[in-house]
Image (cartoon, grey):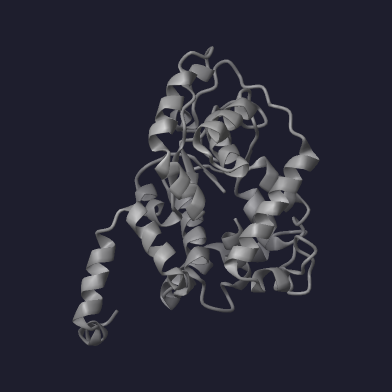
Amino acid sequence: MRAAIAGLRLGARRPLLPAEFNALALWRAAEQAQPAIELFIPYTSAHILDTLKHYAEVRLLLQSTSVLWPGPYTRRWRRRLRETTGLTSEDAMILALGTFGTTASGDILGVPLVVTADLPLLNGYHDHADKLRRLRAMTAHLQSPFDQAALPRLAMPTSLVAEWSDTLPRSVNQ
Amino acid sequence: MSMSQTASVPNRVRQVARLIRSMSDQERRWLIQALPELRQAQAAPAAQADLMAHFQPRLDALAGARPMLDTDPFIAGLSVGEFFALPEAEQARLWGQAHIEAEREIKPFERPVRPNALPARSTGRLRP
């Protein structure tokens, strides 16, 4: 999000940095996919950006994304992820939101992809892949629809732009 | 890249490019960790112009919003210019801190999920 805002702000004035370029390229790829791919931002990001929505760069981002709210089990899942993997509280929250997050109307349960350029989160997810897979088995014992909950895949923006030209996952962009 | 430009690229650079292309996501992350200056490389001008052409008209057409100025307030008590002039690691730290504070302020309750809710991948819903 930071990179997308910086890219929108400065893209007409100076060469974009790779993180800025990749964030905007990913956003465009999501919009141009057939059908378009829905992008989500965490509710905490929406809260921060809401105070800045008089800026065109922020307004466009808010208009182009939906908000992912914690659904039932999100807090418990976050604690379990943190205790099991040692991920930071914030990183565990992103994964928990991706697993049990929902819209304001409650019509979805989780997202398939979390897009992030955060290397500690990406590395933590990769390092604890086995433990995370074992945790996944626990959701199978929950009541429907929560037994369908699944950990999202994590991916960097660069690896998704090409992929999204012919697929239609939905994602949360950190 | 034109043919003359291609011809001037040293062989060892082309070999490195081939190697990087063959890397997995994890290997690319390790590469960026080992060489953080790679983050500072610049996008090709034509690709950037094409990208901005996608967003700029929409930015210009937004009613009730204006472009950020360097002196405008942003987050963490900093102006837009001050924040984006910080090193990446410091921007990330402040951005993360703002999220921690936001979570404290919101104290979110867990939103109900409809009994027929499906994982997002299964819905195929289009963005409005």
Q: Residue at x 74, y 59 (%)?
A: B63
Asked if one can make out residue B128 in the rendered structure from this viewpoint, the answer is no
Q: Is residue A81 left or right of residue A160?
A: right
Q: Residue at x 48, y 29 (%)?
A: B123
Q: Residue at x 45, y 73 (%)?
A: B37
Judging depth in this view, the residue of A36 and A53 nearest the camera is A53
Residue A53: % across, % down: 74, 55
| Rendered position, A148 above or below B40 | above
Residue B59: % across, % down: 64, 63
Q: Residue at x 48, y 39 (%)?
A: A170
Q: Quadrant of the N terminus of chain A?
A: bottom right
Image-quadrant location for residue A54: bottom right
Residue B48: % across, % down: 47, 71
Judging depth in this view, the residue of A120 and B71 nearest the camera is A120
| Rendered position, A64 above or below A93 | below
Q: Exactly how many numbered labels are in the figure?
A: 0
Residue B91: % across, % down: 64, 63
Asked if one can make out residue B16 in the rendered structure from this viewpoint, the answer is yes
| Rendered position, A174 above or below B18 | above
Q: Is residue B125 left or right of residue A53?
A: left
